[in-house]
Image (cartoon, coloured by chain):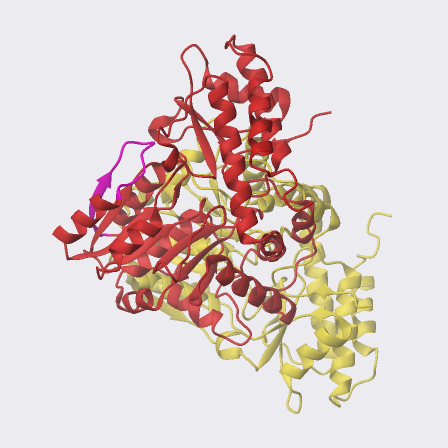
Chain colours: A yellow, B red
Amino acid sequence: MKKNYIMTPGPVPISNEVLMEHGRPLMHHRSPEFSKVFTEVTDKLKKFMQTSGDVIVLTSSGTGAMEAAVTNAFCLGDKVLVVNTGNFGERFKKLANVFGLKVMSLDYEWGEAANPEDIKKLLDENPDIKGVMIQQSETSTGIINDIEAVSKIMKNHSALFIVDAISGIGASDLKVDSWGLDIVCGGSQKAISAPSGAAFISVSQKAWKQIEKSNIPKFYFDLIAAKKYVDKNPPQTPWTPGISIIVAMNKALDMFFEEGREAVYERHKVNALAVQKACEKLGLECLVKNPASRGVSVTSLKVPEGIDGKVLTKAMRAKYGVTIAGGQGKLTGLIFRIGHLGYVGIFDVLIAITALEFALKEQGWKFELGAGVVEAQKTFWENNYMSPKV
Amino acid sequence: MKKNYIMTPGPVPISNEVLMEHGRPLMHHRSPEFSKVFTEVTDKLKKFMQTSGDVIVLTSSGTGAMEAAVTNAFCLGDKVLVVNTGNFGERFKKLANVFGLKVMSLDYEWGEAANPEDIKKLLDENPDIKGVMIQQSETSTGIINDIEAVSKIMKNHSALFIVDAISGIGASDLKVDSWGLDIVCGGSQKAISAPSGAAFISVSQKAWKQIEKSNIPKFYFDLIAAKKYVDKNPPQTPWTPGISIIVAMNKALDMFFEEGREAVYERHKVNALAVQKACEKLGLECLVKNPASRGVSVTSLKVPEGIDGKVLTKAMRAKYGVTIAGGQGKLTGLIFRIGHLGYVGIFDVLIAITALEFALKEQGWKFELGAGVVEAQKTFWENNYMSPKV
């Protein structure tokens, strides 16, 4: 017998309730039954994203939503600022370069969060910047950027504010409207905890104005075409969508609101803290030195000297059924990442730490067996999380 | 109680076997478990498409695969010939125009198939044509184009041969390698009978050579990037794929091969014939006049005078649970379409015809109740399809 546990920053564990919806026979995408679901999902996504603006659902991975942001929001040759804190910052740079934008890049060490003052300085010096792109949660390192602080700076500039919140939104706060975020990208397989295969993107009124002028060629990810279908009665998608994924998202979003936004954020915060404290207790070092820069979706840990990271993640998966993630891009082999995003509870964290302890012990790492698990347990206990309302 | 039956040209009915695979908890897309499935799916798709060349899986609708064909295969300003027999021919034209190609269009009346001689003439007159794009099955009308005949013409020309076989492949024969098809697009929710959300695309060696020279910007649908991941050991996708869709496709492809290619084609042929004969018996007229041009995936029927097509399809769906499709593009309101694609057996056809009879009768259409059903039954009987091997 082998039970499997997925502890990566996406795909994340999926509840049985959502899996059952996802496994239902398919409706036709032009049927009233699906239109009802699609209307509900669109409305729930607006509430999820805290916006009264438009939210468009795309049948693609999150990268498709990032491409939609870049190809719709700009004209060829527009100058944009990419705030680059890791692998997905690099992806925004590549996208902007491929589609003919003039890219100014603000690069940070991987593991550092962006300093809003640096962004302010560049914006002040370059009033011709048409858009700023940034990750809320940089999945490759685990940092969280202070989007609220950056949003205050953006208010004094005309540039569009584009946020890749794919692994961030729903895990910690992101107020699309009140922070003035023009375009925000999300994915089905992250905090929402539905299967992979759908992305979504919010568009502000200010963004639509710039989108209308865009001359970058696009078709599948054409947001104006998508909006025409969303505005139909009943709302639709221009192309056949991932029907079963959207049906699953509908249920998953219900579960988000039933648990309650603040409770979900608190759960993520405590899970992340428990993982980080447990790992530090085991003598591991977080990639993100500054605790204030640590996000709540994923924790990156340095592979310590004497430990083979590949063997470690393989042992966790093959022997104990716990799938965690390795490093991406230039951190490949140097870190491993434990996801605590989405449908993850106390005991999932304890399972991951237990498996990690076994896998570390196998390679001769010195620590007292159970020390990490106890530290995690204490963290849950001290944060009064075990039974807040019982 | 209301049972639901989906009789559209996509999404199509899905077997319980496939739904159960699709509903399984998700694997991580970088795990060995998923790599195994992805390797299997890729190999099975090659066999399904009758090619030893590359097949790339995309997380998108079929339109995404069409966009991938256009943006990867050409350079800006390349002259292409779009053979346009309906709404999806129009889509190829739009795509080619949006992405900066010089489009020559060979337009047919909707309901007519392309004449290979017309294509030959245009190719002979325009040796600078870099690619020919055509639908195998034009889903909006139900015609089938004679791809084999066109392929013989293409062999004397350097242009790439690009076939949208989204609703055609797997329902009737399409030999990618032996017919010399350079790029062929397919979708998960058509003959394969898996859920919607994934597309696939075959690429010949000749196509790769032209793709390497392409200067049209692309990122999400970059086939060279995808090939780099497919060629990894184990093979992967560059972005998070629709994991549950691919898992479902793996099972659905098994069922295709278990039934056997020829048996599947024969089933589609007889199902289509039964629908067409039954409808003609009821006094309805097929949009596609020439029986040789009628495909096996979907039958388009003209809305006869005195009948409200919208009321007809609504009655079939709302009263009897049978979802069929209306017309698309300029045929909206003028035709309705009965799908008989994918996981569709004798009794599904009889159900659709029965519901159609009821819905026609309600609007006062004159015919003997049961006449269509009996005609369909006779068609199955005469084609020795009821129990070919028992």
Q: Position of residue A85 (x, y in %)?
A: 47, 69
Q: Position of residue B274 (x, y in %)?
A: 53, 31
Residue A92, quarter of picture: bottom left
- In this view, the residue in front, A257 or A216, is A216
The answer, for residue A152, to whether it is visible in the render is no
Residue at horizontal 41 percent and vertical 55 percent from the top: A153
Is A77 part of what is drawn in magenta? no
Q: Position of residue A379 (x, y in %)?
A: 78, 66
Quadrant (top left/top right/bottom left/bottom right) for the N terminus of chain A? bottom right
As drawn, A182 above or below B353: below
Residue at the limit of the structure toward the left, as seen here: B125
The answer, for residue B106, to whether it is visible in the render is yes
Q: Position of residue A343 (x, y in %)?
A: 70, 55
Residue at horizontal 73 percent and vertical 25 percent from the top: B1
Is B101 part of what is drawn in magenta? yes
Residue at horizontal 35 percent and vertical 28 percent from the top: B289
Residue B376, quarter of picture: top right
As drawn, A310 above or below B219: below
The magenta segment? B100-115
